[in-house]
């Protein structure tokens, strides 16, 4: 029974990303490599962050501000990392294009670029889910469950799986938004990503209040869904734009 | 979207990475489900890997370090000796002896070690099965395994061969995880260093062996995972499709020449082979690493003890030019040239079984601590493997696959355990994430 519950938690947190992985990523080896390397980058960022914070942990106080600082620094660091990733991706794109020319194949399509961004984002999201949710799930396969005092409405594992799902969504699609924003030089797209990330991070601070997760988690899902909607909207816009641009060329 | 290059790049790398991942995953599962078994087995087993020093939990840290260092040293010396013996035998053309020996070791590993793992699995999950059925199944499993690993003249699907290679790796690695903790770490480090020396140093045994094999145009007398069919599975237009043709024809010819290695250069057929392979030979990045031996040394019988030694002994990575192209960091100008080479001949990437084993040992050892360290180590090892493959494309020469991966793996293990765990557990038990 607990085994079933544990598998259920895993699927709850990772189900959508698993679907994405099987349908989009796994058919193209290069995307798998992108995903793995982006997962590694996220892991390294987490290790660096925890190395910095190791001195101050575990926090003895019940005050909320140390946690706020922790989350703010982490988000700032990761958003900085996204810029570095973008630089790397730019170089990679040039290399891929050069290689495509060499083997007389078409250059990267717009969808290819978006898929690379998606794979990168999914890597971040997966790493997040793996380290913040899955790695704590081991005890849930055992004969008991665990409740947190501050949110005693559901088992801790269930709550962390639900939160992870929101974060996987945010990480995955904000990478698509960000890369597209950088490519187009679109300031709104560039700014909206840190904004979403920051919103989501600060919303988890609500969980520190006793019973706060009742409010915090739905709000978190609002952020996640709006990221998704924004991303969908943006991709749709790009596609219609390119089609309009392509159609006259085809006719002439 | 059909012609997109995303689909053709990295096929080979994934072809190597996915079996390694499967191997690690299964070892982790075995370790998880059998932890009660290994702890209940009571007294520590004396093996080649801990000949000198038996670790007990009560020993002080310095004693443990000293003892495990000695263990690792003895183990590496043993491996080096056996490898030299192997090279010597190969040099004097005892190929048949080597092959039969390898068959016997494969039989032994699959039958005895695999059998004992199966029994413990059966016991753990209380699977209802009678002894006779179990024995017959095990015997069939073993015989098919031995035949498929060294199939000469029998057309055995390469998929089966790959499956058995991975199984061998899993079985040996699962045994290795029974070693005490400190010994495991020092052993891994020592093997990585040994690997580095044996493959790259001018007189290194594996280097000699690889050079010998490529000069004889023979296959290495070793247990090696070949990633060939992954290429043929994806025969999209492009150079890769052509390459597939080259690969398969060459492999057939190699097989043919292998039957009479001494005359191989006389027949017309084999002349062709020589010509065909010639562009490849200089770039043959075969590499052999012998590493593990002790694997099966868990048995106390001396004879078995020696046989076990060679089982995994030979590991080799032979990176075809294809791998080189795929390496993204590779030199651009070289890429174009390589494609042309490739259309003539190429082999798939080969990865020694020992790499499988020791990657999995590392991950299995990490699994005894926590899932978090497992993920970190997995990522580190896979990225190390990726780095090695990219380096292969740059250096175009046989390279050891252990050092980078093991170094990264151990580093990430301790970083995760010491730094990351308190951080992640601290934040996420407060339901805070970012």
Image (cartoon, rainbow, N blue to C red):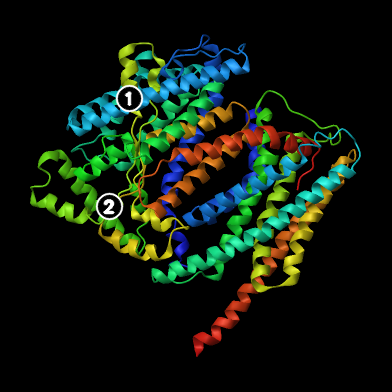
Q: Residue at x 72, y 63 (%)?
A: A229
In the rendered image, is residue B222 in sight? yes
In the rendered image, is residue B141 in sight? no
Q: Which residue is drawn at 17% across and 52% down?
A: B273
Q: Mark 1 lies on which chain?
A: B
Which image quadrant is residue B326 in?
Answer: bottom left
Q: Earlier in the sequence, mark 1 or mark 2?
A: 1
Badge number at residue A27: none
Same-chain check, marks 1 and 2: yes
Q: Mark 1 points at which residue?
A: B81
Instruction: Please determine whether, in this image, residue A112 is positioned above or below residue B271.
Output: below
- The residue sitting at the top extreme is B43
| Residue B143 percent across, percent down from the top left | 28, 26
Q: Mark 2 lies on which chain?
A: B
Which image quadrant is residue A141 in?
Answer: top right
Q: Name the residue under label 2.
A: B282
Is residue B421 left or right of B346 when viewed as pictured? right
Number of other residues with Cα within 10 Å of mark 2, as a class: few under 14, some 14 to 19, many 20 or more: few
Is residue B145 left or right of A237 when viewed as pictured? left
**Mark 2 residue element:** helix
| Residue B185 percent across, percent down from the top left | 53, 27
Distance in Å between CA atoms under marks 1 and 2: 28 Å
- The residue sitting at the front extreme is B202
| Residue B214 percent across, percent down from the top left | 24, 45
Is residue B409 left or right of A160 when viewed as pictured? left
Number of other residues with Cα within 10 Å of mark 1, as a class: few under 14, some 14 to 19, many 20 or more: few
| Residue B86 percent across, percent down from the top left | 27, 29
State the residue in front, B433 or B177: B177
């Amino acid at each position: 029974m607990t085994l079933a519950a544990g598998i259920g938690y895993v699927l709850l947190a990772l189900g959508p990303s698993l679907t994405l992985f099987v349908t989009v990523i796994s058919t193209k080896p290069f995307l798998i490599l992108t995903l793995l390397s982006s997962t590694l980058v996220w892991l390294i960022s987490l290790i660096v962050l925890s190395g910095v914070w190791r001195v101050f942990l575990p926090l003895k106080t019940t005050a909320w501000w140390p946690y706020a600082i922790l989350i703010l620094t982490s988000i700032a660091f990761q958003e900085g990392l996204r810029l570095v990733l973008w630089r790397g991706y730019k170089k990679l794109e040039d290399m891929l294009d050069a290689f495509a020319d060499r083997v007389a194949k078409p250059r990267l399509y717009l969808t290819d670029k978006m898929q690379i961004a998606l794979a990168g984002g999914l890597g971040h999201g997966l790493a997040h889910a793996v380290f913040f949710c899955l790695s704590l799930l081991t005890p849930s396969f055992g004969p008991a469950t665990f409740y947190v005092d501050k949110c005693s409405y559901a088992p801790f594992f269930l709550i962390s799986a639900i939160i992870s799902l929101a974060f996987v969504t945010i990480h995955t699609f904000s990478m698509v938004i960000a890369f597209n924003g950088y490519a187009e030089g679109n300031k709104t797209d560039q700014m909206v990503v840190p904004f979403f990330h920051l919103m989501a991070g600060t919303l988890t601070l609500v969980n520190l209040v006793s019973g706060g997760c009742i409010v915090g988690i739905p709000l978190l899902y609002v952020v996640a869904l709006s990221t998704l909607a924004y991303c969908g909207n943006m991709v749709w816009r790009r596609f219609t734009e390119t089609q309009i641009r392509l159609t006259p060329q085809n006719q002439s | 979207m059909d012609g997109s290059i995303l689909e053709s790049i990295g096929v080979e790398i994934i072809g190597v990475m996915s079996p390694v991942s499967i191997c690690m995953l299964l070892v982790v599962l075995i370790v998880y489900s059998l932890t009660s078994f290994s702890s209940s087995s009571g007294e520590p087993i004396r093996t080649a890997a801990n000949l000198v020093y038996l670790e007990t939990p009560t020993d002080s840290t310095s004693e443990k370090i000293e003892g495990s260092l000695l263990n690792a040293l003895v183990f590496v010396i043993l491996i080096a000796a056996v490898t030299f013996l192997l090279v010597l035998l190969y040099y004097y053309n005892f190929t048949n002896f080597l092959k039969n020996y390898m068959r016997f070791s494969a039989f032994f590993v699959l039958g005895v070690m695999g059998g004992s793992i199966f029994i413990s699995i059966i016991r753990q999950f209380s699977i209802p099965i009678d002894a006779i059925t179990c024995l017959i199944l095990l015997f069939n499993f073993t015989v098919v395994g031995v035949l498929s690993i060294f199939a000469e003249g029998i057309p055995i699907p390469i998929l089966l061969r790959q499956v058995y290679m991975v199984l061998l790796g899993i079985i040996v690695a699962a045994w290795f995880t029974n070693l005490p903790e400190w010994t495991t770490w020092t052993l891994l480090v020592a093997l990585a260093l040994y690997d580095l020396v044996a493959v790259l140093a001018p007189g290194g045994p594996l280097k000699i062996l690889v050079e010998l094999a490529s000069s004889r145009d023979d296959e290495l007398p070793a247990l090696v995972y070949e990633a060939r069919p992954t290429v043929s599975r994806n025969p999209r237009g492009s150079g890769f499709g052509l390459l597939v043709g080259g690969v398969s024809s060459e492999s057939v010819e190699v097989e043919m020449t292998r039957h009479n290695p001494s005359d191989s250069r006389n027949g017309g057929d084999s002349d062709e082979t020589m010509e065909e392979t010639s562009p490849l030979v200089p770039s043959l990045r075969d590499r052999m690493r012998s590493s593990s031996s002790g694997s099966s040394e868990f048995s106390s019988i001396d004879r078995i003890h020696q046989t076990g030694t060679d089982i995994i002994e030979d590991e080799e990575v032979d990176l075809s030019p294809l791998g080189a192209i795929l390496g993204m960091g590779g030199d651009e100008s070289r890429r174009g040239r390589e494609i042309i080479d490739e259309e003539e001949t190429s082999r798939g990437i080969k990865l020694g079984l020992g790499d499988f084993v020791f990657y999995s040992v590392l991950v299995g050892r990490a699994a005894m601590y926590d899932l978090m360290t497992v993920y970190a180590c997995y990522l580190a090892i896979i990225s190390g493997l990726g780095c090695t493959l990219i380096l292969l494309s740059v250096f175009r020469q046989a390279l050891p696959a252990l050092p980078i991966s093991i170094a990264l793996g151990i580093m990430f293990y301790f970083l995760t355990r010491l730094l990351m765990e308190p951080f992640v557990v601290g934040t996420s038990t407060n339901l805070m994430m970012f």
